[in-house]
Image (tube, rainbow, N blue to C red):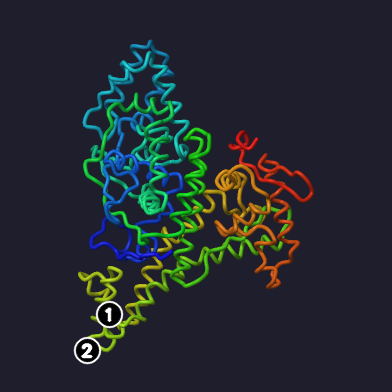
Amino acid sequence: MTMEILDRPAQFEDRTGPTIWVDEAIWGHRLHDEQSPWLTFLEFLTVLLAEHGAGRALQEASLNSLSYRPQTQLKLRNLVFNNPHIMTVLAEDRADELAWAVWLEKMAQSAGGLESTDFTYLRERFETFQDFAAVINFLQGSAIEGDSNKRWSSKFVFPFGPHALYEDVSVSPKGGVSTDRRFFARTGEVLYLMLCRSQRASELRQLLVSRFLQNPAPYDGMAQALQGEPQFSKAERGGAFLPCSTHPVFDRLADDWLAILSLPIPAYDAIPHLVAITGLNLILYQLDRAREVLGREPSTLVCEIVAPKKSVVRDLSADSYQANNALPQQALERFIRSTTQTAQWGAALASDDAALEAAEILQQAFDWPDPDDPDEATGSPQDLIDSLVDKAVVRHKQHVGKIHMTWARAIGLSSRRSSRRVRYAPTDRLLKTLVVTCVPRRLEFKDFLALLADRYGLIIGDHQAQAFIASGDADQEDFSDNARRLEERLASLGLLKRLSDSCAYVENPFQRAEAA
C-alpha cells in the first residue's frame, strides 16, 4: 500500500510546549501519554456523536478538515461529580420535601459553569430524593477512572449512550468554561481520523451508530434524566491532523473493531475490548511510523508468558521492550537531520548567508526557530540543526515519548512482575481481548500463535521466534515452553480446549453457541 504523507496545515492550534512541529509531522496532532486508552475512546465517541449529528460520521470532506461541536453536558457532570451535598442531606435523614429543598439551595450556590443553576426539574423526574441519590451513586460508581483525583469537570461517566458523552473542559472559579486539552488531548481525534481513512469506514459507521448512538444502553436514560436538553460547546473544535492518508494500521484497527462489534454481546460489554485493542494498535502505529522514518522492518514484540523464574524469553522480552521504547526518539532525530540531505539544504549552505537560509528552511519545515526570537536563530547551520534536535527531544520526552511505556502498562501488555526490568508480558485481560478479536469461532492453537505474530508482531512460540533461535540467542525449547504456558493460561481462562495431544483449539467465548 502506498502511503501519502501529508504536509502540516498552514495553520494549527492548541499546542503545548515549545513551538516545534516534529512529533506531529510524524504521528499526528497528537499522541499524548496523559490521555489514557479509555479517555481516547471517550474522545472518539464525542467526535463521532458530533459528526453524526452533522450528517458526516466517519467521513472527511477533505483530509484534515475535521471540525466539530461537542457536547459539554455540564448539568450532568455537576450532578455526578460536583455534588457533595447529596450525601450530607441523605445523612441528615430529612423528610423528602425538606431534603429536596435543602439540596436544591446548596446546589444552586455551588454548581459551576452554568448560566442557570436551577435544578428543580429533577423533582418531576424522580419519585423521591432517595431515588435521585441512588442514580447519582450508580453513575459515580460506574465512572471511567472514577477513583482519580482529577477535577470534577475532567471526570467522565461510563459511555452508556449519547447523553453520557461530552468533552473535557476547565471551569474557572468565576464560572467561565473553556476546552481543556490535557485529558482530551486530541488522541481521540487522531483515532477518529484513522478510522475515517480505513477501507472499511462505511461498515464501521453503520455498526458504531446503530450500537452506540441509536441503540444506547438503558442506563443512558439516567444521564438524560439528569442532564435534560443537551448542552454544546459555543465554538467548533478544529485543528486535528493525521499525516498519513492511508496506513496498514488504520485498516487493521477497523478490522479489529468490526470483529468486536459483530459479537453477540451488548455494546457496553464490547467497550473494554475496543479500548484494549485500540491501545495496542496505537502503540504499534507509533512504533511502525518510527520504523518507517528509520527505514527498518515492521515492529516485533517478544512476549513472555510469565514464568515462575527468570528465563531466556524474559530477557529477550525486556530487550525487545527497551529497543521499541527507544525507537520514537531515534525517529525524531532522524526526521530532523534528514533535512540536511536535501538539495534545498545544500543550496542554503552554498549561499552568502547560510545561517539565515538554513533557519528559513527549518522554520518552514518545523515551525522553528521563532522569527520573533532572534536568539533562537544564532550559530551555524549545523548549530541550528543540533539546537532543534535538542529542543525537540526535550519536548518529545514530556509526552509523546512516554506513550509506549504508559499505554503498554495501561492495556496489560507490559509488566515488571518478578523482574527489575519492564518487559512484554500480556495479562489475562489482554489475552482475552486478543482471543475475542482474532478468533471467529475457534482456531488451532498453533494458528493462533502465527496470527498474533503476523497481525501484531507478537512473538510467543518457537515457530515465530526462528530469528532468535537461528542467531543463538535462544533455544527452541525456551519458546516452546513459553507457548505451553500460554496454552495453560488460555485453558484456565476457559478460552482453549485440548482435543488430543497434538490438537488444541482456542475458542471465542462469545461465539460458542454458533460453533456448536
Q: Secondary structure at mark 1?
A: helix
Instruction: Give above or below for 322 relative to 350.
Output: above
Q: How many numbered tags mark residues here? A: 2
Instruction: Point out residue 8 in the picture as x, y percentages from the top left corner.
Output: 29, 64
The span from disc 1 to disc 2 (Cα, nearest Å) is: 11 Å
Q: Residue at x 38, y 25 (%)?
A: 221
Please identify the quarter of the rendering in which residue 358 is found. Answer: bottom left
Tell me if label 1 and label 2 are in contact, CB under 8 Å: no
Q: Residues within 10 Å of mark 2 (few under 14, many from 20)?
A: few
Q: Amino acid at mark 1?
A: Ala
Instruction: Point out residue 119 in the picture as x, y percentages from the top left corner.
Output: 28, 23
Instruction: Point out residue 445 in the picture as x, y percentages from the top left corner.
Output: 68, 50
- For residue 459, say whether it is visible: yes
Residue 321 left/right relative to 193: right
Please identify the quarter of the rendering in which residue 401 is found. Answer: bottom left
Nearer the N terminus, badge 1 or badge 2? 2
Q: Secondary structure at mark 2?
A: loop
Image quadrant occupied by the C terminus: top right
> Which residue is identified by label 1?
358
Q: Nearer the viewer, residue 445 or 327?
A: 445
Q: Nearer the viewer, residue 25 or 4?
A: 4
Q: Which mark is residue 430?
A: none
Instruction: Point out residue 340 in the picture as x, y percentages from the top left corner.
Output: 35, 80
Q: Residue at x 27, y 45 (%)?
A: 68
> Which residue is identified by label 2?
352
Q: Amino acid at mark 2?
A: Asp
Residue 190 left/right relative to 310: left
Instruction: Give above or below for 317 relative to 124.
Output: below
